[in-house]
Image (cartoon, rainbow, N blue to C red):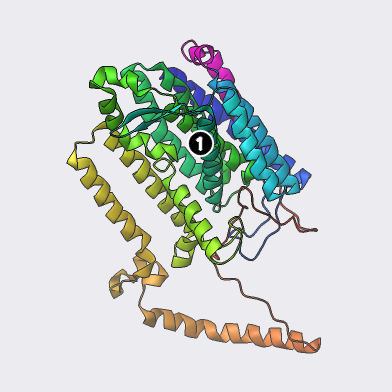
């Protein structure tokens, strides 16, 4: 565990320290998108945060290779090298897209090629544990197609939630934490060395996200861009592939009595990891809903819109930070709930706890819909929106003359030029995305805009 913690700290430190210089490089390189009416942020923000995250990944793998126990992962398995090869390719495609805006089909092809590179080096799904059936071996073509599909789906699912400051990095960090605990339990409790690569991938992914989050929390100073979102999506998919499709349930059968019993014991996490719905359930649900919504409207499945889950939270009335925290809550509830259920699926307290926390999450989700009436003596301790309308009406009456005077002055200024000046109003908290989808289009930076370095 000490070596895993050291790897985590080194990865996070390298990512954190490099993000500042990368931000300045992105500003000089002009890797900043144009501010659009649907965007949440209101200042030009540089991208290319994935550069720092990629070097954090390289640092984590390098440190792990020189540690006593983790070095055995590199000796007994080729999966870390396969991950590095695929990550380098997808990262390069993301960097080019952040700067030059690559065509959607080219990015989709790059994602498939990166998955193919990992398959060629041994990181592939060899069999599937099916409940009630046991271990089902896959042919080479079946394993390749399933691996490529899992990588592409995970990359785009992670990228679809990259719409608010700190959202994608935080959700993936929570998912990686739950995934690390599960993989570490398989490796340490059962002594199965095949789970060691997935454990290493998870702890490095946590370090990448933790190191980048301080720069990306609201208000964000830099975005990870496609170079970062596609990278962390690929690392998450690689861990799921390693522990789901290569860990033989026969090894667990030594402790549970039979292969079918071993498969049944790990069903709560094994089956969801196939697509992976437990670890990134919220991004996967957002991906499915977005495809259905856009296809129903006759649009491209990868056309950017304002219908994502986090955008709807803003439309309900949640603030930027609270919308992000709500998404964190649901990701943690699903991921750690499945983890707890996999440890002791016979416990009713776990199910009741998940149901209770889900009820709390629903109350928090609908909180802006309720505006309780506050007693007069307590109005000074609550936000203005919860105060009585009488107080708000008095404040409006006091501010009305000032607004009218400002309006008359603006009218006189417009009349002197012979034309009326009208400015489109932009509502606070306008739902939108501050990043494009993994294979969707994105507009370029507006000329003449300046950003503070």
Q: Is residue 46 left or right of residue 386?
A: right
Question: Which element is circle 1 on?
Answer: helix
Q: Is residue 28 visible?
A: yes
Is residue 232 found left or right of 109 in the rendered image? left
Q: Is residue 366 above or below residue 88?
A: below
Vertical comparison of 190 with 15: above or below: above
- Which quadrant would residue 339 be assigned to in this image? top left
Q: Nearer the viewer, residue 274 or 281?
A: 274
Q: Give me the residue at 25% from left, 27% from top.
A: 261
Taking the magenta stretch, the answer to whether it contains residue 76 is: yes
* Percent x, y of residue 403: 59, 83
With 89 as the anchor, is 359 left or right in this view? left
Residue picked out by circle 1: 146
Instruction: Report crowding for label 1: few under 14, some 14 to 19, many 20 or more residues within 10 A (C-alpha).
Output: some
Note whether residue 55 is visible.
no
Residue 408 in picture, x, y percent from top left? 67, 88
Foreground pick, 294 / 98: 294
* Residue 126: x %, y % from top left: 47, 26
User: Residue 297, how many percent across, how many down?
Assistant: 55, 67
Q: Which residues are magenta?
A: 57-77
Seen from the viewer's position, the closer of residues 417 and 396 is 417
Q: Residue at image x 69%, y 85%?
A: 409
Q: Is residue 74 magenta?
A: yes
- Which residue is at a point 64% across and 49% down the rendered structure image? 439
Q: What secondary structure do most residues of the magenta stretch adopt?
A: helix
Looking at the image, residue 48 lies above or below residue 386: above
Position above or below: 152 against 138: below
């Amino acid at each position: 565990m000490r070596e895993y913690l050291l790897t985590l700290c080194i990865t996070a430190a390298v990512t954190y320290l490099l993000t500042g210089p990368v931000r300045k490089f992105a500003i000089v390189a002009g890797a900043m998108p144009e501010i659009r009416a649907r965007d949440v942020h209101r200042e030009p923000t540089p991208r290319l945060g994935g550069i720092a995250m990629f070097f954090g990944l390289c640092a984590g793998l390098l440190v792990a290779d020189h540690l006593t126990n983790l070095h055995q992962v590199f000796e007994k398995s080729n999966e870390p090298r396969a991950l590095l090869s695929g990550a380098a390719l997808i990262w390069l495609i993301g960097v080019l897209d952040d700067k030059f805006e690559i065509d959607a089909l080219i990015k989709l092809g790059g994602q498939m090629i990166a998955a193919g590179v990992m398959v060629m080096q041994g990181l592939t799904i060899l069999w599937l544990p099916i409940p009630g059936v046991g271990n089902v071996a896959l042919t080479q073509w079946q394993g390749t197609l399933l691996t490529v599909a899992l990588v592409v789906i995970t990359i785009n699912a992670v990228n679809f939630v990259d719409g608010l400051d700190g959202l994608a990095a935080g959700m993936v960090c929570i998912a990686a934490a739950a995934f690390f605990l599960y993989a570490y339990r398989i490796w340490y409790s059962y002594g199965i060395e095949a789970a060691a690569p997935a454990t290493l991938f998870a702890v490095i992914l946590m370090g990448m996200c933790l190191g980048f989050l301080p720069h990306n929390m609201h208000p964000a100073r830099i975005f990870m861009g496609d170079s970062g979102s596609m990278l962390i999506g690929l690392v998450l998919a690689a861990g799921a592939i390693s522990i789901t499709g290569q860990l033989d349930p026969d090894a667990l059968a030594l402790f549970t009595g039979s292969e079918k019993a071993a498969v049944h014991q790990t069903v709560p996490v094994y089956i969801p990891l196939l697509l992976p719905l437990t670890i990134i359930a919220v991004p996967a649900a957002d991906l499915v809903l977005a495809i259905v919504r856009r296809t129903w409207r006759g649009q491209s499945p990868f056309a950017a819109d304002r219908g994502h889950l986090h955008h709807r939270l803003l439309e309900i009335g949640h603030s930027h930070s609270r919308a992000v925290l709500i998404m964190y809550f649901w990701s943690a509830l699903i991921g750690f709930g499945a983890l707890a259920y996999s440890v002791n699926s016979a416990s009713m307290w776990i199910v009741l706890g998940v149901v209770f926390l889900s009820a709390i999450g629903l109350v928090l989700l609908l909180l802006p819909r309720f505006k309780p009436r506050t007693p007069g003596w307590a109005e000074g301790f609550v936000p203005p929106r919860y105060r009585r309308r009488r107080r708000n009406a008095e404040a409006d009456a006091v501010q009305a003359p000032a607004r009218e005077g400002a309006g008359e002055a603006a009218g006189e200024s417009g009349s002197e030029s012979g034309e009326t000046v009208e400015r489109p109003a932009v509502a606070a908290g306008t739902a939108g995305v501050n990043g494009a989808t993994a294979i969707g289009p994105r507009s370029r930076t507006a000329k003449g805009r300046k950003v503070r370095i």
